[in-house]
Image (spheres, grey):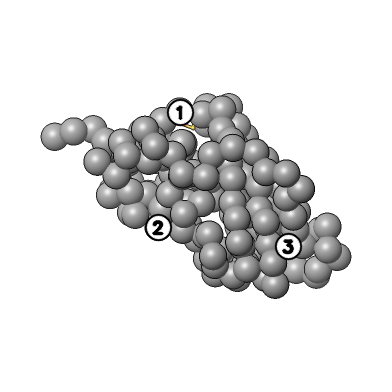
């Protein structure tokens, strides 16, 4: 059996939404606690809707594939819908990742949450801090299946 699904390979070879954004409304940058890789996400937000997303990563193929899929999953969605995104949903949408690469999928989720937090901070929007602390996870959160 192939180690990576066809969807992972597709998003790795042809990542969607890669690049930098001029004048983003929010930026999220996070480092992966496990491997030290880095992810940066830029959001363009209009009337509470994420109208555009771009990402750059200094990370592995799984990080590229999960970020690509995650950006596709939040594009056109409202902020509150984007806040429901989980790394589990992203890996499921990619038909799974090998267990030892699951930590890579956390990077995209955390970067998106960091960007939304940045958006709230820039605009003086009040929020429950718990929303964001829940999403800076450690490895214990990784699913085993
Ligand atoms: Fe670092 Fe995958 S090994 S994100």
Helix, strand or loop at disc 2? helix
**Label 1: few (<14), some (14–19) or many (≥20) C-alpha neighbours in 10 Å:** some
Q: Secondary structure at mark 3?
A: loop
Instruction: Bin the neighbour count of mark 3 within 10 Å (Cα to Cα): few under 14, some 14-19, many 20 and up.
Output: few
Determine contact: label 2, label 1, CB under 8 Å: no
Task: Say which element carries label 1.
Answer: loop
Q: Quadrant of the N terminus?
A: top left
| Residue under the point 74% across and 55% down | 25
The disc at residue 129 is 3
Give the x, y percent position of residue 128: 73, 68
Nearer the observer, 76 or 116: 76
Question: Could you tell me which residue is drawn at 81 percent across and 58 percent down?
Answer: 121
Nearer mark to the viewer, of 3 and 1: 1
Label 2 vs 1, first from the N-terminus:
1
Image height check: is 89 above or below 21? below
Q: Which residue is mark 1?
A: 60
Q: Label 2 neighbourhood size at 10 Å, few (<14), some (14-19), many (20+)? A: some
Q: Is residue 138 visible?
A: no
- Where residue 116 appears, as percent x and y from the top left, is 68, 58
Q: Can I make out residue 19 in this image?
A: yes
Query: Which of the marked residues, 2 or 3, is nearer the chain's N terminus?
Result: 2
Residue picked out by circle 2: 89
Look at 59% across and 45% down and name the residue there: 54
Q: Nearer the viewer, residue 109 or 130?
A: 109
Instruction: Name the side, left or right, on which 58 lies relative to 60.
Output: right
Quadrant position of residue 107: top right
Whether 87 is drawn above or below 125: the answer is above
């Amino acid at each position: 059996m192939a180690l990576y699904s066809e969807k992972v390979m597709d998003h790795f070879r042809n990542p969607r939404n890669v690049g930098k954004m001029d004048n983003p409304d929010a930026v999220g940058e996070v480092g992966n606690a496990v491997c030290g890789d880095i992810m940066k996400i830029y959001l363009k937000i209009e009337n509470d809707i994420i109208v555009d997303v771009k990402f750059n990563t200094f990370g592995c193929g799984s990080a590229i594939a999960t970020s690509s899929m995650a950006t596709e999953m939040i594009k056109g969605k409202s902020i509150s819908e984007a806040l429901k995104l989980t790394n589990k949903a992203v890996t499921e949408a990619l038909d799974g990742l090998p267990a030892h690469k699951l930590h890579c999928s956390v990077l995209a989720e955390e970067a998106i949450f960091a960007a939304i937090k940045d958006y709230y901070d820039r605009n003086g929007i009040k929020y429950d801090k718990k929303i964001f602390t829940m999403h800076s996870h450690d490895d214990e959160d990784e699913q085993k299946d």
